[in-house]
């Protein structure tokens, strides 16, 4: 195939040598190049298409996972694009990472936002190091200002623009509004929801993470089985470039409302438009027990705006009471899990 060459900038952007055009993410770069070669072909996630120093960027992701999760099996067994240990592979299925926010590819692309809004088209910039994240050092006790973000309507976006704020929120659109049916089904496990909910309660800033699961081409069913919270938050100004394509993000209210969306590719006659964030209906699967990966990902001690769970959230509720109430509907059927929760809650006091 045709080879395209670009420069990886210190801020994680990719500059196309031929024209000088700057792209904010591997997905944006790969999608643009693929459209030049074959405009009719749907473009998938760019991480497996772009190489840095001879290695595909998804290999850098795997290396990062090994470094930060030393107690889990290798990425070929467990990772953002792999099944949890002990789960048999099913005929006619393939394991895919939570698809890129720009849509397209072998399975549906999308994410989940507790506020029901979609982070707009251009993926957030990557950190230097081609996929590897740098540790973030922030002063303890520093309070980060949380500014309200007002979502915009999709029709106001226009064509893709690298200068647009990649964290712009866009209102989702229902399939009924465009006279279409949802082209696939989505199922998500209660353990994933539990981890997302827990993760969202720990700081006053927005949090982000990846989702992983299984895409069944025969039944057009995407099953979300794993969540991978990012150690970096959107509230970290220094590390804003270290957060790639947030597949879930947000801060919850009394109880988190998970609002999944899929970014549908733009019409073929308007290939330079942003993808359309579509509201997605989801089936929830109640897990019978808590898996080890969920416990390992329950963290957050270094955040400068870590929630103090003994403080009052409302007139008669502490932040810990709020967290307990929100997690109540997502706990596994196994009654012994209540003891695990109590241990976790005791660490938060």
Image (spheres, rainbow, N blue to C red):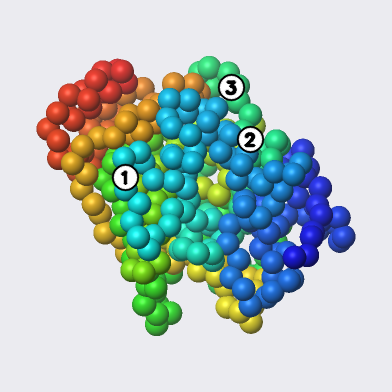
Which is closer to the viewer, label 2 or label 1? 1
Q: Position of residue 47 (x, y in %)?
A: 62, 51
Q: Position of residue 216 (x, y in %)?
A: 37, 62
Task: Answer with mark 1 or mark 3, whichever residue precedes in sequence.
Answer: 1
Q: Where is residue 318 in the image (x, y as percent from the top left)?
A: 26, 27
Q: Are marks 2 and 1 in contact (CB under 8 Å)?
A: no
Which is closer to the viewer, label 1 or label 3? 1
Q: What separation in Å lies between label 2 and label 1 (alpha carbons)?
A: 28 Å
Report which quarter residue 218 is drawn in. Answer: bottom left
Mark 3 closeness class: few <14, some 14–19, many ≥20 residues within 10 Å: few
Q: Where is residue 132 in the image (x, y as percent from the top left)?
A: 63, 35
Residue 26 is labelled as none
Task: Answer with mark 2 or mark 1, whichever residue precedes in sequence.
Answer: 1
* Quarter of the rendering occupied by the N terminus: bottom right
Report which quarter residue 28 is drawn in. Answer: bottom right
Kind of element beneath mark 1? loop
* Residue marked by disc 1: 87
The answer, for residue 211, to whether it is visible in the render is no
Report which quarter residue 8 is drawn in. Answer: top right
* Residue marked by disc 3: 138
The answer, for residue 26, to whether it is visible in the render is yes
Residue 132 is labelled as 2
Q: What separation in Å lies between label 1 and label 3 (alpha carbons)?
A: 39 Å
Q: What separation in Å lies between label 2 and label 3 (alpha carbons)?
A: 19 Å
Q: Do the residues labelled 2 and 3 touch (CB within 8 Å)?
A: no
Residue 261, placed above or below residue 227:
below
User: Residue at 50% across / 18% down in the picture?
Assistant: 141
Mark 1 closeness class: few <14, some 14–19, many ≥20 residues within 10 Å: few
Left or right of residue 226, residue 139 in this image: right
* Quarter of the rendering occupied by the C terminus: top left
Task: Answer with mark 2 or mark 3, whichever residue precedes in sequence.
Answer: 2
């Amino acid at each position: 195939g045709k080879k395209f060459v670009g420069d990886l900038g210190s801020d994680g952007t990719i500059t196309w040598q031929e024209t000088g055009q700057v792209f904010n993410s591997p997905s944006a770069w790969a999608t643009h190049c693929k459209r030049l070669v074959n405009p009719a072909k749907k473009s998938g996630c760019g991480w497996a298409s772009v190489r840095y120093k001879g290695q595909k960027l998804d290999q850098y992701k795997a290396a990062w996972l090994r470094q930060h999760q030393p107690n889990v099996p290798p990425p070929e067994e467990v990772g953002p694009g792999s099944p949890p240990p002990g789960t048999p592979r099913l005929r006619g299925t393939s394991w895919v990472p939570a698809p890129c926010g720009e849509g397209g590819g072998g399975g549906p692309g999308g994410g989940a936002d507790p506020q029901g809004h979609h982070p707009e088209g251009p993926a957030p910039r990557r950190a230097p190091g081609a996929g590897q994240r740098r540790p973030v050092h922030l002063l303890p006790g520093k309070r980060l200002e949380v500014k309200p973000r007002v979502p915009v309507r999709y029709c106001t976006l226009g064509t893709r623009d690298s200068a647009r704020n990649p964290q712009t929120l866009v209102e989702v659109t229902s399939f009924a509004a465009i006279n279409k049916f949802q082209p696939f089904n989505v199922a998500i496990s209660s353990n994933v929801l539990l981890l997302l909910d827990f993760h969202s309660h720990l700081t006053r800033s927005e949090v982000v993470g990846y989702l992983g699961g299984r895409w069944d081409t025969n039944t057009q069913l995407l099953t979300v089985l794993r969540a991978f919270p990012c150690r970096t938050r959107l509230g970290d100004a220094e590390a804003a470039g270290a957060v790639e394509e947030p597949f879930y993000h947000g801060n919850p209210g009394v109880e988190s409302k998970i609002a999944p969306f899929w970014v549908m590719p733009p019409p073929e006659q308007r290939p330079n438009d942003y993808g359309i964030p579509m509201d997605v209906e989801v089936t929830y699967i109640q897990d019978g027990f808590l898996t080890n990966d969920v416990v390992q990902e329950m963290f957050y001690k270094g955040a400068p705006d870590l929630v103090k769970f003994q403080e009052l959230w409302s007139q008669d509720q502490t932040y810990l009471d709020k967290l307990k109430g929100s997690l109540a509907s997502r706990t596994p059927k196994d009654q012994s899990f209540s003891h695990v929760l109590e241990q976790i809650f005791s660490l938060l006091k």
